Image (cartoon, helix red, strand yellow):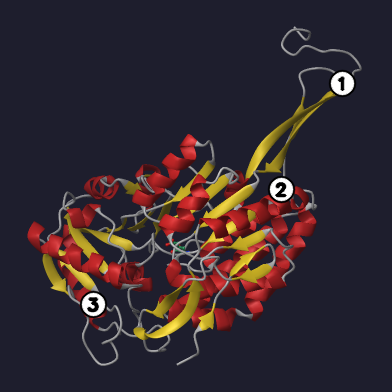
């Protein structure tokens, strides 16, 4: 067992304890006897110090040329690369995901860094003709100011990078509030930012709870922008607060992602996709497959093969190389999944496999839940409508492609979606008709790449997209500039008519 890390807040370039002097523990979800880190339990006073530092640093950071900001972001990419194994190993112990997935999470951060490092030499605006003579027109991006980044525990490196790196390249300064369960990962990430040469005050880290630190940030008058990833319920509260104070807010919230398998699909491929989409990261992705919409002609065959593959999945600590499915993040999440199993039974769904807390050697001190498949689920049931965020997938039978699309769209969420079919016409209809921010054809619902927009429609988001060049629209404002070099007053819409 490793010695617990002592975490600190990072404010104005200094590592500091919380002003309260209080700490909380971040525990290993696969072995709750192991403390991964002692973490400052911050309060409004710490938020205040971080926001003051970020506000002060903004004055100079916004004037650093974007290609120079990019050099620091490039260094962050290098730092992430050289500490990839260390970060992945801490992540696997602290968050529970299997080591290869933890490495993938860090890799997503690395890819993101190199992508946005390049963006500093683009940040393109437009030039366009003016309708008047001797007049020039163009657009340029301006930073927003001080950004609060509130991030979840399921992607402890990738998601903070998705937010922080475009925010930095655009010239904003940051107060970062990670989820409590992944405080050690957030600390290592912040070390990498500091070592890369991010100037004091530009990137600040405040550990602590949502109700205390998150709330103080969203209500703080000197915060200009909040970027939040988490539940739709919390996101709605964040949006309401930001709406009242005219803060820009970008929300990435729940999902109830579905994979359709048509009768013409390559079933082996669809099976692999379903297993990876439903049980990868123990179902704790906003993009996880939680509904399998199966054409009736293949349902029986598909289901028996799915059961066979599921029975082979190995539960255990993420750090064990034989593990396929790690623990849930904490007790609250375990209770949530247990609760949904009760709901499923009450609603009349059939538990084909799993459905209970996992027992067995090595699993006694962790939040392990068996990979679970629910059958006889109809679209109206709560288990088909509400986000569970665990290793639980519901099977829904359909008679036609049209019905499959209608069932997939019968959701308040719209993040990711997948269709397995060999029919090109159906593939294109699916791309057009599915109500989701992401659609995969013959691939699972998980696996977004950093240079493409990420986000969803309906209750999943509020119209913004993270990643790719789309994220620049979250972290910058357009300025339109007219330069009149005629030496006289020219009245648009009047003098040229
Ligand atoms: C999330 O679940 O919050 O596409 C993000 C994926 C990952 C990102 C998931 N690249 O599943």
Q: Where is residue 293 shown, x and y percent of the image?
A: 24, 57
Q: Give the x, y percent position of residue 405.
A: 28, 47
Q: How far, Cα to Cα, is label 3 from label 1? A: 71 Å
Q: Mark 3, residues whose alpha carbon is within 10 Å: few (<14), some, or many (≥20)?
A: many
N-terminal of the pair, mark 3 or mark 1, is 1
Q: Which residue is mark 3?
A: 370
In contact (CB < 8 Å): disc 2 and disc 1? no
Q: Secondary structure at mark 1?
A: loop
Q: Residues within 10 Å of mark 2 (few under 14, many from 20)?
A: some
Please report the residue visible at 49 percent of the width from the left and 73 percent of the height from the top.
39
The kind of secondary structure element at disc 3 is loop
- Residues at marks 2 and 3, CA–CA distance in whole angstroms: 47 Å
Tell which residue pokes out farthest to the front in this image: 20
Label annotation for residue 123: 2
On-image quarter of the C terminus: top right
Residue 4 seen in the current view: yes
């Amino acid at each position: 067992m490793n010695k617990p890390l002592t975490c600190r807040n990072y404010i104005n370039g200094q590592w500091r304890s919380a002003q309260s002097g209080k700490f909380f523990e971040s525990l290993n979800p696969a072995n709750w006897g192991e403390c991964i880190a002692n973490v400052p339990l911050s309060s409004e006073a710490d938020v205040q110090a971080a926001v003051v530092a970020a506000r002060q640093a903004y004055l100079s950071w916004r004037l650093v040329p974007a290609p120079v900001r990019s050099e620091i972001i490039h260094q962050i990419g290098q730092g992430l690369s050289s500490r990839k194994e260390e970060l992945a190993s801490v992540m696997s112990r602290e968050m529970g995901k299997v080591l290869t997935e933890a490495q993938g999470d860090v890799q997503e951060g690395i890819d993101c860094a190199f992508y946005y490092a390049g963006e500093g030499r683009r940040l393109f605006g437009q030039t366009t003709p003016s309708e008047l003579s001797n007049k020039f027109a163009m657009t340029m991006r301006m930073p927003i100011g001080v950004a609060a980044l509130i991030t979840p525990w399921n992607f402890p490196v990738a998601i903070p990078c998705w937010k922080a790196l475009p925010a930095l390249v655009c010239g904003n300064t940051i107060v970062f509030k990670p989820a409590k369960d992944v405080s050690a990962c957030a600390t290592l990430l912040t070390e990498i930012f500091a070592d890369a040469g991010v100037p004091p005050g530009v990137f600040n880290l405040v550990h602590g709870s949502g109700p205390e630190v998150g709330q103080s940030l969203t209500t703080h008058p000197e915060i200009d922008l909040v970027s939040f990833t988490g539940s739709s319920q919390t996101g709605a509260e964040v949006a309401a607060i930001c709406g009242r104070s005219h803060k820009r807010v970008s929300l990435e919230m729940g999902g109830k992602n579905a994979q359709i398998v048509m009768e013409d699909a390559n079933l082996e491929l669809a099976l692999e996709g379903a297993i990876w989409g439903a049980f990868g990261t123990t179902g704790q992705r906003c993009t996880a497959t939680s509904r399998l919409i199966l054409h009736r002609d293949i349902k029986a065959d598909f289901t028996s093969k799915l059961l066979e593959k599921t029975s082979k999945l190995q539960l255990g600590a993420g750090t064990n190389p034989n593990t396929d499915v790690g623990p849930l993040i904490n007790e609250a999440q375990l209770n949530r999944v247990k609760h949904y199993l009760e709901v499923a039974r009450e609603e009349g769904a059939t538990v084909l496999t799993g459905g209970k807390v996992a027992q067995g050697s090595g699993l006694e001190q962790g939040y392990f839940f068996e990979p679970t498949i629910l059958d006889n689920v109809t679209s109206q049931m709560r288990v088909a409508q509400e986000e569970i965020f665990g290793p639980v997938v519901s099977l829904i039978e359909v008679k036609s492609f049209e019905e499959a699309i209608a069932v997939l769209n019968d959701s308040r969420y719209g993040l990711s979606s997948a269709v397995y079919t060999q029919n090109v016409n159906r593939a294109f209809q699916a791309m057009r008709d599915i109500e989701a921010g992401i659609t995969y054809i013959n691939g699972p619902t998980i696996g977004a790449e950093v240079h493409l927009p990420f986000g969803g429609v309906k209750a999943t988001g509020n119209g913004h997209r993270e990643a790719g060049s789309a994220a620049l629209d979250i972290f910058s404002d357009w300025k339109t500039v007219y330069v009149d070099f005629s030496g006289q007053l020219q009245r648009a819409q009047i003098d040229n008519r």
